[in-house]
């Protein structure tokens, strides 16, 4: 099955990270303890996990930044992109790229979370997103 | 809406990466061109994107490894964990952690993809996964 169950992001300060995700994105944790916060997403979990725990669990050496990945969150309209980027920047994020029209159309900008993980905030009219937030590929 | 639309992984060789995802995991691309391969996942997209393109698009400097994140793929039974880890290692992956029973129970190991992105392969009986592969939090 083509399935991802969790994205775990290494974080250094849970409260700082929560401010970005809870106040910035407006998301609610489904679980939290003193080392991890889980958010129930569209068919998968987002975990923000103290970096030393993630490092030990995955048997890795020093985790580096910026990592070679990004995450994207799509919004319903073109007009939603800039205000959400601004709010995320006010909640501890760092602007990476102001909104631009990408080659296929739409509108997208990037912001880094307080732990330097890149989030693209995008309006992409070619990709259908259903009532549960599930994204379907389209051109 | 609590929604992630894309996970983009920076890759250095699309064919090498495809071998891991297509032959290792057994997944089928929904789209590919000379710089990106998209896989339709459970309510979101996995994109494997040439690293210099991802770097330019997100306005970042050099992308580093290992990044401070991991992805997880859950399997239906305890017996599925070890064979999938072994197949992924045969398809260009690197074993990070042999399967162990984590504190909450279940079974999980880690493998890095050919671009050093960590994947946890887990059996977690506490998390429900429906017929569409959508994961629901549980304890």
Image (cartoon, coloured by chain):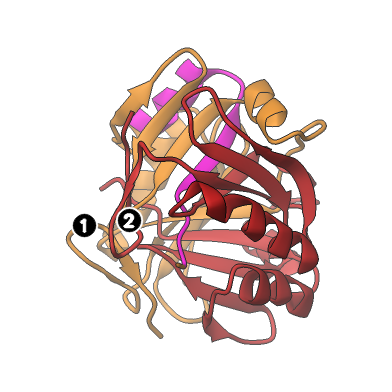
Chain colours: A orange, B red
Q: Nearer the viewer, residue B75 or A104?
A: B75
Residue furthest toward the top?
Answer: A34
Q: Quadrant of residue A52?
A: top right
Q: Which residue is mark 2?
A: B134
Question: In the image, is residue B21 part of the stretch drawn in magenta?
Answer: no
Residue furthest toward the left?
Answer: A131
Q: Which residues are magenta?
A: A2-22
**Residue appearing at x 28%, y 31% in the figure:** A28
**Residue appearing at x 47%, y 81% in the figure:** A104
Q: Nearer the viewer, residue B34 or A33?
A: A33
Left or right? Give the position of B26 relative to B18.
left
The location of residue A33, given as percent across then percent down, is 42, 15
The location of residue A103, given as percent across then percent down, is 52, 80
Question: In the image, is residue A6 part of the stretch drawn in magenta?
Answer: yes
Report, in whole angstroms, how far the alpha carbon at label 1 lies from the one at label 2: 11 Å
The chain letter under disc 1 is A
Q: Is residue A97 visible?
A: no
Q: Do the residues at discs 1 and 2 belong to one chain?
A: no
Q: Which residue is mark 1?
A: A132
Image: A107 above or below B128: below
């Amino acid at each position: 099955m083509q399935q991802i169950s969790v994205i775990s992001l290494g974080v250094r300060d849970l409260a700082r990270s929560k401010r970005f995700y809870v106040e910035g994105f407006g998301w609610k944790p489904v679980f939290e303890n003193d080392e991890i916060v889980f958010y129930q997403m569209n068919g998968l979990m987002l975990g923000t996990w103290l970096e030393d725990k993630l490092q030990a669990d995955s048997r890795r050496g020093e985790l580096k930044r910026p990592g070679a990945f990004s995450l994207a969150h799509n919004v319903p309209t073109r007009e939603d992109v800039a205000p959400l980027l601004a709010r995320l920047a006010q909640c501890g994020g760092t602007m990476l790229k102001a909104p631009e029209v990408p080659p296929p159309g739409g509108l997208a900008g990037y912001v880094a979370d307080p732990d330097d993980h890149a989030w693209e905030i995008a309006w992409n009219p070619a990709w259908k997103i259903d009532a549960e937030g599930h994204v379907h590929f389209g051109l």
